[in-house]
Image: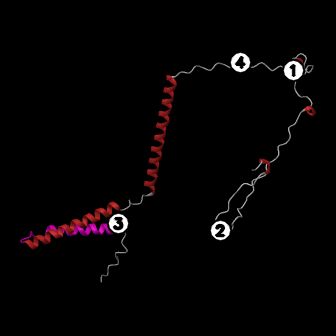
Amino acid sequence: MTSDPHTAESYTPQERRARLRAFADRMLDHLEDLAPPQDVPELERTVRIGLLIERLYARVDIAERRAPPPPLTPEQEAAEAAQRRAEHHAYWVDRVNGLRLMREAEEAKTLKPAPAPVPALAPPVYSDWTQDFEGYGDEDDDLIDDLSDEVTAPAPKPEPPLARVIDTQDPLRAPVQYWRPPERPDYGGG
């Protein structure tokens, strides 16, 4: 057991990556200090240590690439927000100016004549229109003036609604109830 107060659970991800990189650096320094291998087993041991150090560096690099960026300070956040606002404003200024120039170019291509002024209307003259027609009301115009003379058609007889007739010939064996129009005496049925 060690008396180190830091355990693996208490390290932050940034601390863990930094300590792993420092360990790989120390191993690489010690590998360089070793004497050159004299036989095959020593050579194999040195190659394995080198591959292990390379794997450590690869793990650290992958962990650093996947790590979230460090939190921004309030000054950095304010600077980024000001930059985004300036870019947004510049984009829309350019966009509006471009649209205005396009509209002006279109208007220059097609000059429209000025609309003709609308003349003022004369005020209306009111008159008794019955005097404008000669003999109004003196002759018979074949229109029915009195409603008592009008001939009215008899009101149509309403048709009875279609009734629901259930086939009662064999109700125990009939799997389905049928809709059947009733016999109507006014059709002459037969």
**Under tag 2, what secondary structure?**
loop
Q: Amino acid at mark 1?
A: Trp
**How many residues crowd around disc 4 within 10 Å: few (fewer than 14), some, or many (20 or more)?**
few
- Disc number lying in front (4 or 3): 4
Q: Is residue 89 magenta?
A: no
The residue beneath circle 1 is 129
Position above or below: 144 against 121: below
Of labels 2 and 3, earlier in sequence is 3
Marks 2 and 4 sit apart, C-alpha to C-alpha, by 88 Å
Q: Is residue 19 magenta?
A: yes
Of labels 1 and 3, earlier in sequence is 3
112 or 183, which lies in front? 183
**How many residues crowd around disc 2 within 10 Å: few (fewer than 14), some, or many (20 or more)?**
few
Classify residue 38 as left or right of residue 160.
left
Classify residue 90 as left or right of residue 183.
left
- Disc number lying in front (2 or 3): 2
**Marks 4 & 3, CB-CB < 8 Å contact:** no
The residue beneath circle 2 is 173
Segment colored magenta: 13-39
**Under tag 1, what secondary structure?**
helix
Of labels 2 and 4, earlier in sequence is 4
Classify residue 77 as left or right of residue 170.
left
1 or 105, which lies in front? 105
Q: Amino acid at mark 2?
A: Arg
The residue beneath circle 3 is 14
Residue for point 51% across, 27% down: 104
Of labels 4 and 3, earlier in sequence is 3
